Amino acid sequence: MSNIDFSQQISPEAKAAKARVALFADLARIRWEAETGGVTLQDGTALPSDEVSARKLTSAVTSLQNSMVSEPVAWKFPGGWQDLTQAQIEAAAAAVAQHVQACFSAERTVHQQIDALTDAQVPGFDVQAAFGAALAGQGGA
């Protein structure tokens, strides 16, 4: 007679549900890393896209639009200092905002893909590749 307690056995459905939760957690991490990993402007300038940088850019736009400060605005980039016009600050803020939105849109797309997976498809799903494809489809990289 066996002492194995089969009531503790994990069903295939429970395994798939647990794996699906792990995919969602991986997806959120991948999106956050992309979101805060920075963005490159058309002229090749690299901009940080973390929450603090985004708030500072938004604040600079508001301050310029309300004549609280005047241009040029001294701005520190990873590669050094630049004096920026209002148009340049607005373009930088827009680029960061669009990048962040593209990351969230890509996450939603992949979230929906994960939701649509059958239990048998869950273990082989490549979240990183799916997110990369979805982000590229949003115009991000």
Image: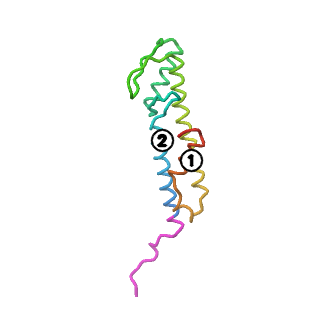
| Residue type (three-letter) at the residue carrying disc 2 | Ala
At numbered mark 2, what does the secondary structure look like: helix, strand or loop? helix
Q: Check the image and name the residue furthest to the bottom.
A: 1
Which quadrant of the rendered structure holds the N terminus?
Answer: bottom left
Other-residue count near label 2 (Cα within 10 Å), few / some / many at <14 / 14–19 / ≥20: many
Using the image, determine if residue 106 lies above or below residue 52.
below
Q: Which residue is mark 2?
A: 34
Other-residue count near label 1 (Cα within 10 Å), few / some / many at <14 / 14–19 / ≥20: some
Disc number placed over residue 133 in the picture, else none: 1
In front: 54, or 45?
45
Is 96 magenta? The answer is no
Percent x, y of residue 3: 38, 82
Is 10 magenta? The answer is yes
Using the image, determine if residue 53 lies above or below residue 107.
above
At numbered mark 1, what does the secondary structure look like: helix, strand or loop? helix
| Residue type (three-letter) at the residue carrying disc 1 | Ala
Magenta span covers which residues?
1-15
Percent x, y of residue 123: 51, 62
In front: 33, or 20?
33
Task: Tell me whether the residue at label 2 lies in contact with that at label 1, contact meaning CB atoms closer than 8 angstroms.
Answer: no
In front: 115, or 5?
115
Using the image, determine if residue 38 lies above or below residue 25.
above
Using the image, determine if residue 27 lies above or below residue 95.
below
Q: How is the image coloured?
A: rainbow
Q: Sequence order check: which comes first, mark 2 or mark 1?
A: 2
Q: Residue at x 47, y 46 (%)?
A: 30
Which-is-in-front pick, marks 2 and 1?
1
